[in-house]
């Protein structure tokens, strides 16, 4: 079942006039449309599906706009709607493999271990930041969608763990362990390319 933003009471719904709804929509939501499309494309791996997903997200955002609290993170609010729409509507149609069993992942990569290594494995501070974008994008796109998503949210979009937990509807500990595993998977995929480009962290 789709998890939508909490619907407010009739009294609360009267808080916005139609004009105010359009003002909030244009001011708070539209500036994020490029990020929304990039996220949708990374999830669907298809331009048409990405466009449909973004359009669906914005339609839902406008429908539930009275439940958006101005001053909060509009981008995170939109990303959560998009993520839920993807899971419920578009992922069913995709050829993505079944979701991995994160119980096994989290047994090995618990939140304590992830917490200790979260900064050292941050893609923004690794040598991959100097690599050709297409190679990194290709490796990222090859990850299972759940791992791909946490890297996009954290290392590309810059969401905090707390924001990611709300977007993904999972505990912060799960965010940490999933991100830790995702970064390791991505680095493994980039090792061969890194070596070919002369990157070797073991060299003096």
Image (cartoon, helix red, strand yellow):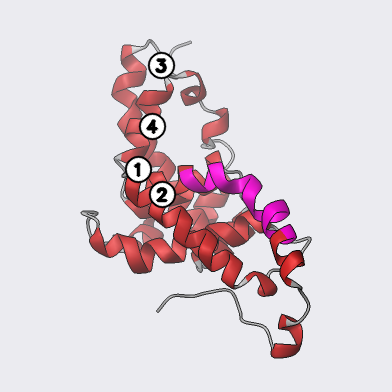
In the current view of this chain or complex, which residue is farthest to the front? Answer: 19
Question: Of circles 4 and 1, which is in front?
Answer: 1
Secondary element under disc 4, as helix, strand or loop, is helix
First-in-chain label (4 vs 2): 2
On the image, the x and y values in percent for residue 17 come to 76, 73
Task: Indicate which disc, 2 or 3, sits on the residue closer to the N terminus.
Answer: 2
28 in magenta: yes
Look at the numbered disc 3 and give the secondary structure of its residue: loop
Please give the residue where the numbered disc 4 appears in the rendered image.
Answer: 137
Residue 174 as seen in the image, left or right of residue 19: left
The majority secondary structure of the magenta stretch comes to helix
Q: Position of residue 156 (x, y in %)?
A: 54, 39
| Residue shown at the point (57%, 43%) measured from the top left | 157
Q: Are marks 1 and 2 in contact (CB under 8 Å)?
A: yes
**Dot 4: few (<14), some (14–19), or many (≥20) neighbours within 10 Å?**
few
Task: Find residue 47 and name its label.
Answer: 1
Q: Position of residue 4 (x, y in %)?
A: 52, 74
Q: Which mark is residue 51?
A: 2
What label does residue 200 carry, if any?
3
User: What whole-number distance in Å separates the C-alpha atoms at marks 2 and 3?
Assistant: 39 Å
Q: Are marks 3 and 1 in contact (CB under 8 Å)?
A: no
Q: Quadrant of the N terminus?
A: bottom left
Q: Residues within 10 Å of mark 1 (few under 14, many from 20)?
A: some
Residue 146, how many percent across, how many down? Answer: 38, 55
> Of marks 3 and 1, which one's residue comes earlier in the chain?
1
């Amino acid at each position: 079942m789709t998890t939508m933003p909490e619907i407010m009471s009739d009294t609360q719904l009267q808080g916005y006039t139609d004009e105010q709804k359009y003002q909030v929509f244009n001011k708070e939501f539209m500036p994020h449309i490029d990020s929304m499309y990039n996220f949708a494309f990374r999830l669907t791996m298809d331009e048409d599906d990405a466009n449909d997903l973004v359009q669906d997200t914005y339609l839902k955002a406008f429908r539930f706009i009275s439940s958006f609290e101005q001053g909060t993170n509009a981008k995170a609010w939109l990303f959560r709607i998009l993520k839920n729409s993807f899971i419920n509507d578009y992922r069913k149609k995709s050829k993505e493999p079944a979701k991995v069993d994160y119980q096994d992942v989290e047994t090995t990569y618990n939140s304590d271990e992830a917490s200790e290594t979260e900064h050292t494995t941050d893609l923004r501070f690794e040598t991959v930041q100097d690599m050709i974008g297409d190679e990194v994008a290709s490796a990222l796109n090859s990850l299972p969608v759940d791992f791909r998503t946490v890297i996009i949210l954290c290392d590309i979009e810059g969401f905090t763990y707390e924001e990611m937990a709300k977007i993904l509807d999972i505990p912060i500990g799960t965010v940490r362990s999933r991100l830790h595993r995702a970064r390791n998977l991505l680095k493994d995929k980039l090792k061969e390319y890194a070596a070919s480009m002369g990157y070797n962290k073991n060299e003096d």
